[in-house]
Image (cartoon, rainbow, N blue to C red):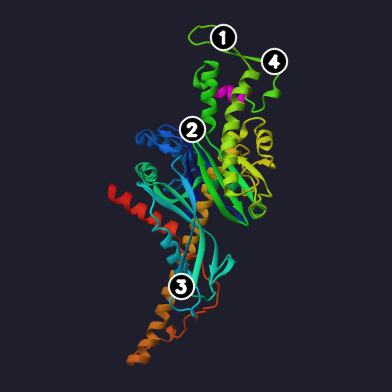
Amino acid sequence: MEEDNIAVGLDIGTTKIVAMIGRKNEYGKVEILGIGRTKSLGVHRGVVNNITQTIQSIQQAVQQAEANSGIEVEGVTVGIAGQHIRSLQHSDYITRNDVEEVIEDEDIDNLCNQVHKLVMLPGEEIIHVLPQEYKVDGQSEIMEPRGMSGGRLEANFHVVVGQISSIRNIGRCVKNSGLELNGMTLEPLASANSVLSQEEKEAGVALIDIGGGTTDLAIFKDGIIRHTAVIPLGGNAITEDIKEGCSIIEKQAELLKVKFGSAWPGENKENEIVSIPGLRGRDPKEISLKNLSKVIHYRAVEIIDQVYLEIKNYGHEEQKKKLIAGIVITGGGAQLKHLKQLVEYVTGMDTRVGYPNEYLAGETDKEIASPLYATAVGLVMDGLERKVFEKEEREQAEEEHVGVNAEQPEETTADHNTEGKDDSHEKSPIPEQPNQPARPSRNVVEKWFDKLKEFLDNAE
């Protein structure tokens, strides 16, 4: 049985599926209790193309995680990625009826819901509506409008869009694996939460998550997400190039890349050679490490160029939008030798490799604190935050319920002179404090997620 303070992240990638069980310890750090990892079958470039195989891979990963932790998994937080994801900037506003009334959650929800009415391409649906900054009656650069007065509430939004059929297929795979769908998060956002510090997000940083089938980009500035993109190239494209260029099978190409691969051809001498066993009694094949590095280099440069184009599209070259903290690379592809140096060379930006160890408990296994598991750790963190929020909502609802029960007998006595008043109900409810900062609203993503769950339930 899952406890209230335990969450499960499910990273459905192109090359691997990871189920990770974690909880928050007394120091607020994430303690990983169990992990399951299986080869991903049925996923291509982040999109499910074989439901049956994907279900089998999910079940195997979850069973491994359960065996490692001794905890039965019921619900998961799953990541959304894939080449169908795109993003756009949008501005919108609402006119409020009562100028004197302060801006509340309801007004912000109305503004976000208005963005959801944007007309998308056929088959597309808005996944995330992320407010950038607000304007109230023309006053700009407002980060928190709740509690302010004004007639016109405006906001700039970062809108993430995806193919609804691809997202529903992920949902179906999770449900048919016998799991509850607790939440969905965009994978670049999950990875960013696990490897970036708040200081980096404030200064301006580009997170590049190099996966097997896709490379995800998330750009932060002033603590806010500014741009997201998914490039349909990843580590598998490099493996494919090695396979074709060296005329070897995929398994050997992957091993070559991991053990001897380098993104910088100058590192290898001409006479460095590795021998690959031949197939079915054939002679071994000798491969020059310099040639191997050249093959890797050309594809790695192509991926970096496409990412850098997205960074320039965001406006990094403008002084106001400059990314002072540079680039953070993570994901399985970030483990490629000399990739950090190549990214710095191509972009001219400071670069570091992102490890998800900052938010993990001290005794965590070193293997888990690898860039390979950045997304899974981020999904666990997201699931834990979701559980805390749900717990707070439950407690608040209970408090309100108790308050109403405490108030009811007094009202009855005053209005109807009912006899038998119980002294134990004389405690007055907590007075309302309208000037208190508002609680975070149940955002539009959650409402969209509820609609998705309803669709999946009806499709059973």
Mark 4 or mark 2: which comes first in sequence?
Answer: 2
Instruction: Using the rendered image of the protein, determine whether residue 31 is visible from the camera's viewpoint.
Output: no
**Residue receiving disc 1:** 284
Q: Residue at x 40, y 33 (%)?
A: 42
Task: Please tell me whether mark 3 sits on a helix, a strand or a loop.
Answer: helix
Mark 3 or mark 2: which comes first in sequence?
Answer: 2
The part of the chain drawn in magenta is: 253-260
Q: Which of the pair 451/208 is nearer the observer?
A: 208
**Residue receiving disc 4:** 270
Is 379 situated above or below 446? above
**Could you classify mark 1 by the number of other residues whose Cα lies within 10 Å: few (under 14), some (14-19), or many (20 or more)?**
few
Secondary structure character of the magenta stretch overall: helix
**CA separation, marks 1 and 4?**
19 Å
Q: Residue at x 35, y 47 (%)?
A: 122
Q: Residue at x 62, y 49 (%)?
A: 359
Q: Is residue 59 magenta?
A: no
Asked if marks 2 and 1 touch (Cβ < 8 Å), the reply is no
Asked if marks 3 and 2 touch (Cβ < 8 Å), the reply is no
Which of the two discs, 4 and 3, sits closer to the camera?
4
Asked if marks 1 and 4 touch (Cβ < 8 Å), the reply is no
Which of the two discs, 3 and 1, sits closer to the camera?
1
Image coordinates for residue 169, horizontal then vertical, percent: 36, 42
